[in-house]
Amino acid sequence: MNYNYLFLIFGFLVVLGIFLLKIWIGLFLRFKWGQTPKSYGPERHLVLKAGTPTMGGVIFVVLTFIASFFINVKSGNAMETLILWWLPLGGAAVGFVDDFIKLSKRSSEGLTSRAKLFGQIIVVLPWAWIASREIDLFFSQYLPAIPSGLAFIFLAFFALGLYNALNITDGLDGLAAGASAISLVILLLISNIDSCIISVIIGLACSLSFLWYNSHPAKVFMGDVGAHFIAGLLMGNVALSGRILLIFPVSFIFGIEIVSVILQVISFRCFGKRIFKMSPLHHHFELCGWPEGHIVVRFWLVHLVGASLLMALLARQVI
């Protein structure tokens, strides 16, 4: 693999992504399209984030197809390509439908929770079935491969979880995009599969070009289409690596965010009490008075440190 050429393409995609996002933002402003914040979120979002252009994740898909003209995104065999790109593109399709409904209704509610989950399941189950039969998944190099039936359950569960966890994390300017970039760098450092390296380079270009406009104060949001695309790309790389436990460092902060939501719901329904002022966790700190920029950078640092520690434990076969 020609790494000099890959670096060149990476730089080109970042610059192209910034240019395309500028056009995308201008299009939304011209037609007065924009985000409608959820009424049950922090009150400041109703004022500060209303009307902000959204669905920036569409550009992620565009960049991926443009990249395919310059680098062979199908550098592996057909099955590798399917396992790697099925989740990001299929998830992006589900997210696009959800975002489009919100946009057309000028509402914060798109697909119902059940409909969105059904769409995610339609994407995930065939992928998990194929991946569990084509890839040998391991908990450890000292243990035998996970049986395909059990691998199917793990892959489906983690894929669905990551779709929703990354989507939940995308609630503050730059939070999800920056954390995703950290996860992608981790994957880039450990990957030895050409098709994975190429996909991570594309994902990094998408995340960093998006951060150009999504850093506080955000001029565009990625929407469900972007969150699903990045989550699918991360999960596809984890699966193709054969190391199922890699999901924990890669999704460290995303896991914390979705667990905070689960704990909040269980606590309120079972005991009538809230653990946090608001979930997911980043909203709790907002209501505690932390500035948005501080929360984002600190969550990035927590993700970086937590992922690094888990990677060290994985390397030593502790987990």
Image: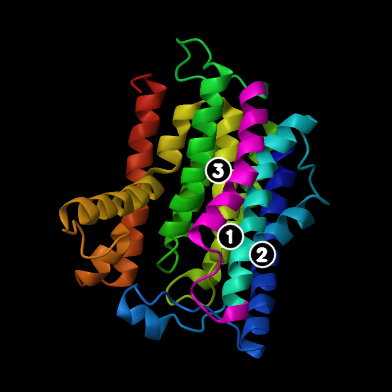
Q: Which residue is mark 3?
A: 234
Element at label 2: helix
Q: Quadrant of the image for the C terminus?
A: top left
Give the spatial CA distance, label 2 vs label 3: 17 Å
Quarter occupied by the N terminus: top right
Q: CA distance from mark 3 to mark 1?
A: 12 Å
Identify the magenta region. 104-133
Which one is in front, 16 or 55?
55
Asked whether residue 274 appears in the rendered view, the answer is: yes
Residue 152 lies, with reference to residue 98, above or below; the image says above
- Find residue 116 and report its horizontal and vertical position in percent: 55, 56
* Residue labelled with disc 2: 58
* 3D distance between C-alphas at marks 1 and 2: 7 Å
Q: Does residue 57 appear in this view?
A: no
The quarter holding residue 276 reads bottom left
x%, y% of residue 46? 39, 82
Front residue of 191 and 267: 267
Is label 1 in a helix, a strand or a loop?
A: helix
Q: Are marks 1 and 2 in contact (CB under 8 Å)?
A: yes
Residue that mark 1 sits on:
226
Whether residue 13 sits left or right of residue 214 in the image: it is right
**Residue 143 on image: x %, y %:** 46, 10
Mark with earlier residue (3, 1): 1
Q: Residue furthest right?
A: 69
Q: Amino acid at mark 2?
A: Val
